[in-house]
């Protein structure tokens, strides 16, 4: 199992930097360290991370409401892609939603990111629509959704935040 924990405030800068390079490339930087820190402190949001030897490998940020969960961001360092890290993070966040009685997860991915779109489709997400200019009026986005009750979520290691 790949261990996933909740992010600590000291993770905000590394999460923001990974977002800037791997998600927000070519866009204005919106997920700054301050915004990530606010997400970490928000009781309606989980910021989950995967670390190895104190280094951030990946993160996911999920917001929960009464009716649905919204995956705001998910990124994996390039060296750790296709090793199950992204799937473990997503499973962890989906498990929280299921345990809270939430059956729907929604997210958006850049239309120009076929690898991300394929990742989510493999995880049971279906593409609902393409929205031109979704990202700052610059890039098109794809809206995706998954019904968590249509298939069991894989088991993942869930532990307390790392020190």
Image (tube, rainbow, N blue to C red):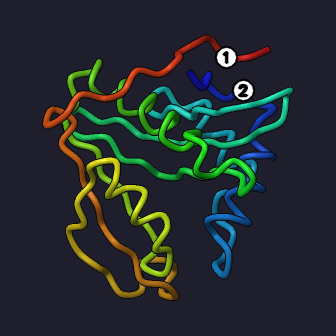
Task: Name the residue nearer the viewer: 6 or 157.
Answer: 157
Image point (63%, 40%), residue name: 38
**Rendered image: mark on residue 8:** 2
Give x and y (percent) for residue 73: 52, 52
Image point (31%, 81%), residue name: 131
Give x and y (percent) for residue 100: 28, 21
Asked if the residue under mark 2 is in contact with the one under mark 1, i.e. CB atoms within 8 Å, the reply is: yes
Tell me the element at label 2.
Answer: loop
Position of 45 relative to 83 (above/below): above
Tell me the element at label 1.
Answer: loop
Give x and y (percent) for residue 102: 22, 30
Q: Which residue in the rendered view is the most extreme toward the left? A: 150
Comes first in the chain, label 1 or label 2: 2
**Rendered image: mark on residue 161:** 1
Occupied quadrant, residue 40: top right
Image point (69%, 39%), residue name: 37
Image point (66%, 76%), residue name: 28
């Amino acid at each position: 199992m790949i261990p996933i924990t909740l992010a600590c405030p000291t993770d905000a800068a590394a999460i923001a930097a990974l977002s800037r390079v791997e998600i927000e490339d070519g866009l204005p930087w919106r997920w700054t360290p301050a915004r990530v820190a606010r997400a970490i402190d928000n009781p309606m949001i989980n910021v989950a991370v995967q670390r190895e030897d104190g280094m951030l490998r990946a993160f996911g940020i999920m917001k929960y409401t009464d009716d649905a969960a919204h995956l705001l961001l998910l990124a994996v360092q390039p060296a750790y892609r296709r090793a199950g890290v992204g799937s473990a993070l997503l499973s962890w966040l989906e498990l929280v939603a299921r345990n809270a009685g939430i059956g729907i997860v929604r997210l958006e991915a850049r239309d120009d990111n076929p690898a991300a779109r394929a990742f989510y489709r493999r995880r049971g997400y279906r593409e609902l629509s393409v929205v031109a200019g979704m990202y700052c009026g610059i890039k098109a986005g794809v809206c995706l959704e998954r019904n968590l009750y249509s298939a069991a979520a894989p088991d993942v290691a869930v532990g307390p935040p790392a020190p």
